[in-house]
Amino acid sequence: MDSDLSPQDKKDLDKFIKFFALKTVQVIVQARLGEKICTRSSSSPTGSDWFNLAIKDIPEVTHEAKKALAGQLPGIGRSMCVEISLKTSEGDSMELETWCLEMNEKCDKDIKVSYTVYNRLSLLLKSLLAITRVTPAYKLSRKQGHDYVILYRIYFGEVQLTGLGEGFQTVRVGVVGTPVGTITLSCAYRTNLAFMSTRQFERTAPIMGIIIDHFVERPFGNMGHMHPCNYRAPAEEEGGYTGVEDSQEVCTTSFSTSPPSQPPVLVGAADFCHPSTLNAANPHQMGIPGKEGGVPQQVPVQPCHAAQAEHARASSCLPNDHVPAVPSGSGEDAEASSRSTDGKSVSPRDVMETTFTRKVGAFVNKPGTQVTTASLDLPFAAFAPRAYDIEENDPMVQPPESPATSSPLQGSLHSQGSGESGVPAQDDFVMVDFKPAFSKDDLLPMDLGTFYREFQNPPQLASLTIDVSSQSMAEDLDSLPEKLAVYEKNIDEFDAFVDTLQ
Amino acid sequence: MNCRSEVLEVSVEGRQVDEAMLALVHTILLHRSTGKFHYKKEGTYSIGTVGTQDIDCDFIDFSFVRVSSDELDRVIRKAVGEFKDLCCALQDAMGNGTDGMGQISLEFYQKKKSRWPFSDECIPWEVWSIKVNVVNLANEQERQICREKVGEKLGEKVINIVEVINRHEYLPKMPTQSEVDNVFDTSLKDVQPYLYKITFQITDTLGTSVSTTMRRLIKDTLAL
């Protein structure tokens, strides 16, 4: 396969593939840092910007990428993968997406390496820049903070997608044919974001949970000062980045192979992450907590090491930081009430979209955990009586082991499989639980929705159920004189009754 | 050579027209722009560097990447602004309840020099038509839903754009120094997109163009 390629072309191609792999990792990780990226165009070629694109190199990311590559190049059967996962302040983690740089055996022998392949790789990087902003993890990463952070892991070898849960979607960024094979860049991303924490009910009170802190002051005071210590000030940022020249020099060294089961990289960011718990291949259903917990306390004041920002933990404090999942500029209550009536029969993907704009606890897409999102739709659920709401229905307290639980609040946003959960039998075709906002009644064991449902079909009045066949109109008319005679006899009683009314 | 034609369709609210169009046009231009060419002796050239910038939309739950070029952004914003003004003018003329439809076309072309007295010929090689359906929404709840839905749709359109671009179909050959202006727009300081032009057309819900609608309105007024 390589025999048709001149030595110079082969050397160039290897170099292109290597730096393409490194730049791919940079683009992906930088897109998950939680910050807006801005690089300047330069009319004068600097000679150090690979693929004619201004993509800065974060040294630690380059280091990790090279460590993963270990001197090899992505090739046939040897894929380079960047796994993006989410880790909550509770220590629970979930794999969000996996970017794969692969090569297959389909060769394009006629293609010019130094020109066409290079330009197409440049185009592919631009496509990667565009697609990294479109996948769901981008919005999550922009809202990362002290509730959760986004982590990355680079590995080399076989692609592992089992951690993405069921129904993950794949988007292909692009392909570039080369004389030695076709390079393919794609992304597989999770769609099922149900995430229940097993630790939630160990907490003191759900009042501190995700439902409540949507509306109250953050329990740990002003989080503004918690603008993370790994946030890079511009001056620091400039100093922290190195040009490609360093990468080029470093690229010539050899690497050791790292095993696929290597835990996510926690370079310099060991504040509340425990490598032993971060087995990304095992995303169990866990609830994402709100902004409670001792996370801020646990975050040590790390030295402002460049590693931390680059490690995709750069969680900048958003202006609306206390509600990171709410789109900026939208009213929370409006959103809450819209959520309560929205998405009644939406697809899981739509539900996913709905939950994105909620707090972190809105990663509820599984049937059994819908009650969390449904509960979220009830504003001031904080003030609902615990005896009824929190303990019986709050999944934080009693996370359902399986989808089939008895809470009537389940299935409000999930249109599939809710029949198998606690939907009342008389409404087994109703996929959506009617949940009017502000309707919780703590005196009666029913809410407005239940009341409405029960009384919308009242029984017929007895007077309207006369059996017509037994009495005809003629008979009615015939019996009238007799009835009138009886009424006249009792006229005094009627008069007395009328007097009492006056 | 056949011109490659791609059609994208989106439904947006009036105030989202700007951002939706900017997102799609900039995504296409990101892929159809290179760094500035610097020709050297012996027919070789070097290429400048293209920077990128993340842009967050205000009225749509969406972010996109554009080329870091304020000049290019100004040109695109001006064109998109004119398109939006026409859309709004039509809606105002027809009444608040009317939905409108417009189409913005981004055409990449090459110039072919002709001999005197003929003018240069513009030969399109790729045309992107973005059909916009402008809807009226009744309340804030619908607007919230629209924010997210349009964001999702734009994401799908970006994926469509990337898919088309990465088919690696016809692209003009890299020109010599004398012909670079026939292929690229060299008027910008920092980046060099392929020669392009933006045109648009507005129609009302019946599919008639604005001029026809205005003519009819005037006739009806005079007839009274």
Image: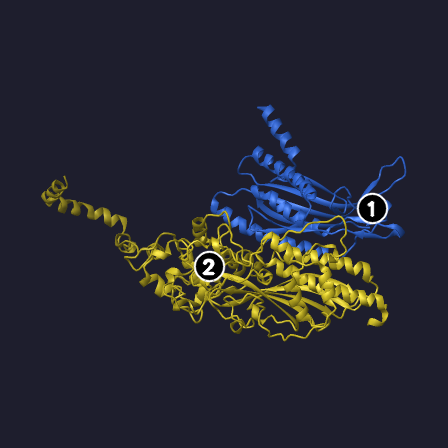
> Which class describes the residues within 10 Å of circle 2: few (<14), some (14-19), or many (20+)?
many
- Residue drawn at x 69%, y 40% as measured from the top left: B75
Q: How many marks?
A: 2
Which SS class for mark 2? Answer: loop
x and y, in percent, of residue A229 in the image: 53, 58
Numbered badge on residue A413: 2
Nearest the eye: A422 or A251: A251
Q: Where, quadrant-wise, is the C terminus of chain B in this rendering? A: top right
Q: Amino acid at mark 2?
A: Leu
Nearest the eye: A115 or A378: A115
Please indicate whether residue A99 sits to the left or right of residue A331 in the image. Answer: right
The disc numbered 2 marks a residue on which chain?
A: A
The disc numbered 1 marks a residue on which chain?
A: B
Numbered badge on residue B180: 1
Instruction: Note the chain letter of the blue one.
Output: B
Q: Amino acid at mark 1?
A: Val
x and y, in percent, of residue A412 in the image: 43, 59
Question: In the rendered image, is residue A56 in sight?
Answer: yes
Q: What tint does the image give chain A? A: yellow
